[in-house]
Image (cartoon, grey):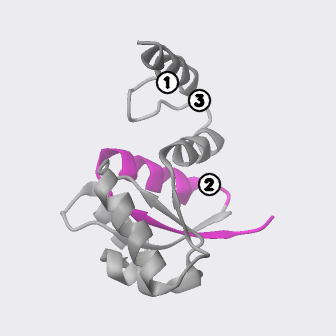
Amino acid sequence: MEKHNIAIVGLGRVGTVFLEKVLRSDGVLIIKSVCEPADTAGKKMALAHGIPIGCIDDIIKSGVDVDVIFDFTGDEQVAELLRGKLEESGNNYTQVAQKRIARLIWSLIADDDYLPEVEATKYQSYADMLLSQQK
């Protein structure tokens, strides 16, 4: 199976759970770097596993060594900043994962665990999302 190098931006509640699941998964996703300025449980976990901690610019400097950047900051401006910096660097290979891609990855690696965003199963989250779009 092909391995994919990832970076994670934002190790708050959701990012930390995602990090934990990736660390416990079958090794298809390789965490190359994380970005978290605050002293969170996720940052401590990354340090304990020897994962490099850096800033957004450090991740961008990784170039094509990172396939996908997962943004768990919850701030759309961060995703825009990441995309802009990738474009400025000439890197048209690395992708910033959209939230729905992160949810898809989550559903593939998390079994029937609760999604941290809404504390519901992936099926309940999907139903909630559909209902909110009908309003």
Indicate the quadrant where residue 48 lies: bottom left
Q: Amino acid at mark 1?
A: Ser
Which label's residue is closer to the chain start, 2 or 1? 2
Give the number of the mark in front: 3 or 1.
1
Picture coordinates of residue 116, whole percent (x, y): 40, 35
Residue 40 point in image, percent of width and height: 23, 58
Q: Secondary structure at mark 1?
A: helix
Question: Would you say residue 73 is visible in this rendering?
Answer: no
Q: Which residues are magenta?
A: 1-26
Q: Which mark is residue 25?
A: 2
Q: Establish if 12 lies above or below 31.
A: above
Q: Which residue is label 3 attached to? A: 112
Q: Which residue is mark 1?
A: 125
Q: Is residue 34 left or right of residue 38?
A: right
Say which mark, if any, is on residue 49.
none
Q: Residue at x 52, y 32 (%)?
A: 113
What's the amino acid at mark 3? Asp
Residue furthest to the left? 38
User: Residue 128: x and y, percent?
Assistant: 47, 18
